[in-house]
């Protein structure tokens, strides 16, 4: 029974496209867009009065605690991903007079000359 060859069904693409097109039109007919909103006058309003409740101090403290950053909540980073930006102070004191760590752009005679040549349109030695 495993050796019986099955007949291959040739799909008619035009017929399949027509079925999909009719399905699409049916979906468009049943689709309903609600663009205008209004109050339902027959719906009963709330049975309870909107009373101003006193502020719960414990709940407010919980909200303020969750709004704090992780540095103020914990003393140390709890995950490895938090360790990346945990210490915001630089590891090395940034001394701007130290030329070993600060490589500022220096304009010498040759750099000024080449900048002037490039601004005039000399593109031979780019």
Image (spheres, rainbow, N blue to C red):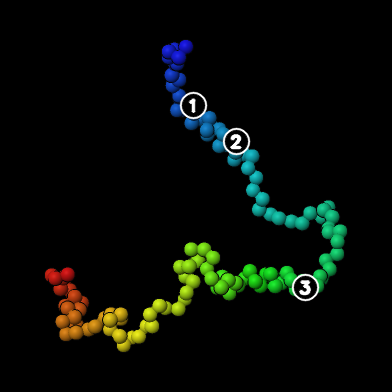
Using the image, determine if residue 15 lies above or below residue 5. Answer: below
Residue at point 73% right, 69% down?
59
The answer to whether residue 21 is visible is yes
**Of the pair 56 and 38, the residue shown nearer to us:** 56
Tell me what residue is drawn at x 30 percent, y 85 percent.
98
Q: Which SS class for mark 3? A: loop
- Of residue 122 and residue 56, the one placed in the foreground of this image is 56
Which residue position holds label 1? Answer: 15
Neighbourhood count class around disc 3 (C-alpha, 10 Å): few under 14, some 14–19, many 20 upward: few
Residue at the disc numbered 3: 55
**Mark sitting earlier along the chain (1/2):** 1
- Please provide percent x and percent y for residue 57: 75, 73
Left or right of residue 59, residue 24 in this image: left
| Label 2 secondary element | helix
Q: Is residue 116 visible?
A: no
Judge left or right: residue 63 versus residue 24: right
Sequence-wise first label, 3 or 1: 1
Which is in the foreground here, disc 2 or disc 3? 3
Q: Observer-nearest residue: 118 or 14?
A: 118
Marks 1/2: CA distance?
17 Å
Q: Compared with residue 11, is residue 100 higher up or lower down, i.e. above or below?
A: below
Circles 1 and 2: CB atoms closer than 8 Å = no
Say which residue appears at 55% left-offset and 37% top-offset: 24
Which residue is tagged 2?
Answer: 26
* Whether label 2 touches label 3, CB < 8 Å: no
**Distance between the Cα atoms at labels 2 and 3?**
54 Å
Residue 26, position as x, y percentages in the image:
60, 36
Q: Residues within 10 Å of mark 1 (few under 14, many from 20)?
A: few
Q: Residues within 10 Å of mark 2 (few under 14, many from 20)?
A: few
The C terminus sits in image quarter: bottom left
View extreme (bottom): residue: 97
């Amino acid at each position: 029974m495993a050796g019986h060859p099955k007949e291959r069904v040739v799909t008619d693409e035009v017929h399949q496209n027509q079925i999909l097109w009719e399905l699409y039109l049916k979906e468009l007919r049943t689709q309903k867009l609600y663009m205008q909103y209004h109050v339902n006058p027959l719906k009963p309003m709330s049975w309870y009065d909107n009373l101003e409740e006193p502020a719960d101090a414990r709940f407010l403290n919980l909200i303020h605690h969750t709004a704090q950053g992780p540095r103020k909540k914990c003393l140390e980073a709890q995950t490895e991903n938090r360790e990346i930006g945990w210490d915001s102070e630089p590891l090395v004191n940034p001394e701007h007079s130290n030329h070993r760590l600060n490589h500022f752009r220096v304009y010498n005679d040759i750099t000024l000359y080449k900048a002037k040549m490039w601004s005039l349109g000399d593109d031979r030695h780019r």
